[in-house]
Amino acid sequence: MLAVIITIGVVYSLGFREATSQIVNMPERLRNFTFPIWEQHAFSQHGFLVFYSMEDYAKKIAYSNHSTAYLFYMYALYKVEMYVSALPMRVTGAFLNIISLAGVTFFFLSRLVEKRLAFGQGLLILLSVVFMVSMPGFWISSARFNVDNTFPLIFAFQALAAFLIWKNQERSAAVMTVIVLFAVFSPISAALLGLALLVWACRSDGLDRRMCRLALVALVAAVAFYLPSPLISKALGFTSSNSGWLFRAGLDGDTTYFTNILKSVLVPQFPRPFATIAVPILFLVAQLVCLRMIKRREPAGVAAPAGTSPLAGIGMFYFLLFSQYVITGLLWPQAVAIHPYLYDYLLMAPVFVAIVLNFAFKPSPVALRFWALALLFCISFHLQQVAQAKCQGCYFPGAWDASVKQP
């Protein structure tokens, strides 16, 4: 935890504070429009909806894709900013979001580690956590883009649900509570979790009933907590400003923002440095290749019997972790292409969690010094990207298209 706090402090001082200060005073739809409208008018006039501008409110145009519970959370951050100007919503939210990621990772470690870690493993875990917390895509997005992005916060619920389901606690109140809370804060994400569970339920001998039952809980909760906002919007006579399904899916035929699913990830419409996602992914691939080679060299009988390892069946865990990004890319690739700065987190957070867990539970790497130096190199790369994010007039440092500037 001390390493997490120090890393946050370093990131903040190197570039996050300056990058935030360049945009924090620009109008934001929650702080400058939505929440003042909430405070000035009765519920029967605003319905706890989101408004892009005062003109939209006057014209009865509202956005209704955010859950009310999540907006209440953001409203609490808004009140903090009103009382402490040094803690803007995007700063406080970023701190809480990255701490939640580190917190769930620690939760996994505390539940899975069966014995005291060796010094080498502990060192690599520490460095990999610093590598995770310093991820530049997260900090740059938090400083420059949508302050009401739900993904970093709700990933903690996604990860907890995946972990509890993996550890076969589906009958406990804990997993049901996490799934419902997931739906409360992000109904659409909970629906995607339900779809992922249905996919995992498909087996060669039929459907897994327990997975189908959990999928049903997720889908029912998602519908129950998503419907109130659009229904209230209709009841109050508001016109929706939500993007349509065909547009987000790229099925509208317009190639202005999107041509195919592959390019939506590799060459999105909004340019961002590919290295910010390539470096951790390549690190994970190299890690897995190296650990597989070490495992092959082990004499027969060294591995634990099937089902006794703390990582037995971990494929389900990783499938559920990555499912948010995979299914989102499948259903709404044009949204991914237009907003890579938002959706990249759903890909990167699971990658970093995988890196940490690999160092904790796979056989101790022989090349300790190599992995330590590789992690230090990657951490340095991250900090350099964050430090360069304070460049005046740019969104991403080193973006492919230098012509993309701030308004």
Image: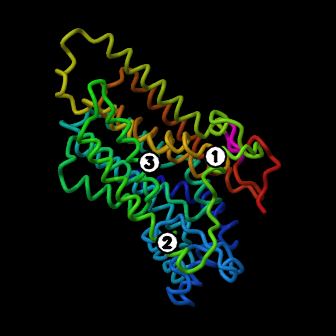
The crowding category of the residue bearing disc 2, from other C-alpha atoms within 10 Å (few below 14, some 14 to 19, many at least 20), is few
Q: Is residue 163 above or below residue 289?
A: below
Residue 79 position, x and y percent, is 50, 80
In the displayed structure, does residue 180 sit left or right of residue 155?
Answer: left
Residue 277 against residue 44 in the figure, above or below? above
Its colouring scheme is rainbow
Q: Nearer the viewer, residue 294 or 377?
A: 294
Question: What is the x, y in percent for residue 20?
Answer: 63, 64
Q: Residues within 10 Å of mark 3 (few under 14, many from 20)?
A: many
Pick whichever of labels 1 and 3 is earlier in the sequence: 3
> As shown in the figure, which amino acid type bears the numbered disc 1?
Gln
Q: Which residue is mark 2?
A: 231
**Residue at point 52%, 69% (across, down):** 230
User: What is the chief secondary structure element of the magenta stretch?
Assistant: loop
Q: Which amino acid is tagged 3?
A: Leu
Q: With 396 as the anchor, is 225 left or right in this view?
A: left
Give the label on residue 385, or none. Answer: 1
Name the residue rendered at 18%, 52% in the picture: 172
Q: What is the magenta range?
A: 267-273
Does residue 272 belong to the magenta stretch? yes
Q: CA distance from mark 1 to mark 2?
A: 43 Å
Callout 3–callout 2 Cβ contact below 8 Å: no
Residue at 56% from the left image edge and 66% from the top image edge: 90
The quadrant of the image that shows the N terminus is bottom left
4 over 283 or under it: above or below: below
Q: Amino acid at mark 2?
A: Leu
In the structure shown, which secondary structural element does the residue marked by tag 1 occupy?
Answer: helix
Instruction: Identify the element where label 3 is drawn.
Output: helix
Q: Quadrant of the C terminus?
A: bottom right
Residue under the image location 46 percent in, 67 percent down: 67
Residue nearer the viewer, 309 or 331? 331
Q: Secondary structure at mark 2?
A: helix
